Image (tube, rainbow, N blue to C red):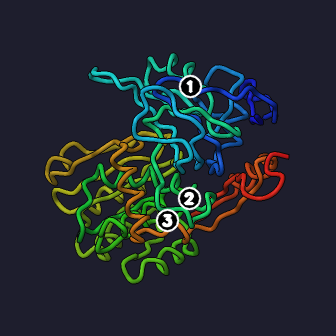
Amino acid sequence: MKAWMLDEPGKPLALRDEPTPLPRRGAVLLRMEAVPLLSYTRAYVEGKLPYAFPPGPFSPGTNGVGRIEAVGEGVFGLRPGQRVVVHPYWVANEAVAEPEQILIGLTGISAGSAPMLADFPHGTLREFAEFPASTVLALDGFDAMPSARLAVLGKFSVPFGGLRRGRLVAGETVVVNGATGYFGSAAVLAALALGASRVVALGRRAEPLAKLVELGSGRVVPIVLTRDGARDVAAIREVAGGGADLAFDMVGHAQEPNATLAALRSLRRNGRLVLMGSMDVILPITYSEMLRNNWELIGHFMYSSADYLALVSLVASGQLSLDVVELATYPFAQLEAAIDRAGAAQGLQCTVVSAEGERAWG
C-alpha cells in the first residue's frame, strides 16, 4: 500500500510503499477515502510545535472517512464493507481514575501516554489505516454523500464536544469567541443546531462574521471586538439581552486575554464559560468576580463517543448541514499542495485529501 511517512519532525514527508497491516484484537483496518487536514499541519511536520510525536517513521493524519477492510478479534459492532468516520482521540479503556490518552497520528496527551503512541503510531494519511475500534463510528445511511464532504465532520467534532460539556440547553444565548477561526466558525453552527436561540459571534474581522450571520437565519449576531474590554463587554451584553447563558472560547494561541475576559464578563449570573482554545499568556481571573456571579469555568479537551454519535445524528437528520463549509479537495498524491491550502484556510473552509477520482495516490 501507499503511505505518507514522516521519518522525524523537520524531515520532508515521503510517499512510500509500506506493508499493509492486519487488524489486531480490538482494532479495525480502514481503506481511507478522505482525510481532512489541520490548519497547522505544516508547522507540525516541520517540528515547530511542542508536541509529543509518535516514534518515527510514522504516518501523520488525524480524522478521516473510509470503509472497513477487516476487523480484528473482539470487535462486535463493526463489519467489513461498512462506511465509517474515524477520529484520533483514543482514551485507554481501563478502570483507573485518569486513563492515558493520545491523539493518534498527532501527539501524546497524558504524562504516561508514550506506550499508546508506540502501539498505534500511524494516522490516516495512508491507503490502509489501523485504528482502535473505539475511535471508529458507523456512517450507515450516508451513501449519497461524498466521502470528502463527510470528512468535514472532523471540523465540527471538537467544538461540538465542548458545547455539550457546557450543557447547552435549547433556547439559551451563546457567545462564541474566535468565531472566525477553523473550529470557532463550526462552533457557531453547532450551537444553532443544538437549539441556541441566539449566538453572539465574536471576531476581529467583519467580513467572515457576515457569512455566519447569513447562515444564522436571524439567530446570529456579530460583534467586531475592539480590544477595549469594557466597551466589548457592554456591546456583547446588549445584543445578548442583558447577558449570555454560555460562552465558548476557541481562540488560537492568543497573545492577550482581553477577548476571553470579555466573553466571561458577558455572562449572566450562573453562566458557564468553556475553554477549548489556546492562549500564550496568563488568563487573569478575579476570584471575587467569579464568586459574586456564580460563574462556572470549564476547561475541556476534545469530545466523547456519545458526543460524536450525537453529531452524526444531527447531520443525518438535516439539523446540521456539512454543505455550508467551503471544501478544497486534493488527491492524496498532492498532499504538499493540500497542506499549503489548509494553512491558508479561514473560517468555514476545510481542506481534504481524497481517494475519489483518478490517480489519487500518484
Image position of 244 with respect to 19: above or below: below
Residue bearing mark 2: 150
Which residue is drawn at the image coordinates 57% and 19% (left, top)? 118
Report helix, strand or loop for mark 1.
loop
Residue that extends furthest to the bottom in the rendered view of this protein: 218
Question: In the rendered structure, which amino acid carries the disc numbered 3?
Answer: Gly
Q: Answer with left or right where residue 110 lies relative to residue 273.
A: right
Which residue is drawn at the image coordinates 65% and 26% (left, top)? 21
Question: In the rendered structure, which amino acid carries the disc numbered 1?
Answer: Phe
* Quarter holding residue 329: bottom right
Q: Position of residue 284 (x, y in %)?
A: 35, 43
Q: Position of residue 285 (x, y in %)?
A: 30, 44
Report helix, strand or loop for mark 3.
strand
**Separation of disc 2 and disc 3 at Cα?**
27 Å
Q: Which of the marked residues, 2 or 1, is nearer the chain's N terminus?
A: 1
**Separation of disc 2 and disc 1 at Cα?**
24 Å
Q: Answer with left or right where residue 239 lies relative to residue 155.
A: left
Which residue is drawn at the image coordinates 44% and 19% (left, top)? 111
Report helix, strand or loop for mark 2.
helix
Residue bearing mark 1: 120
Residue bearing mark 3: 203
Which residue is drawn at the image coordinates 47% and 26% (left, top)? 73
Is the residue under label 1 in contact with that under label 2 (CB below 8 Å)?
no
Image position of 333 with respect to 18: above or below: below
Of badges 1 and 3, the one in the foreground is: 1
Image position of 14 with respect to 32: above or below: above
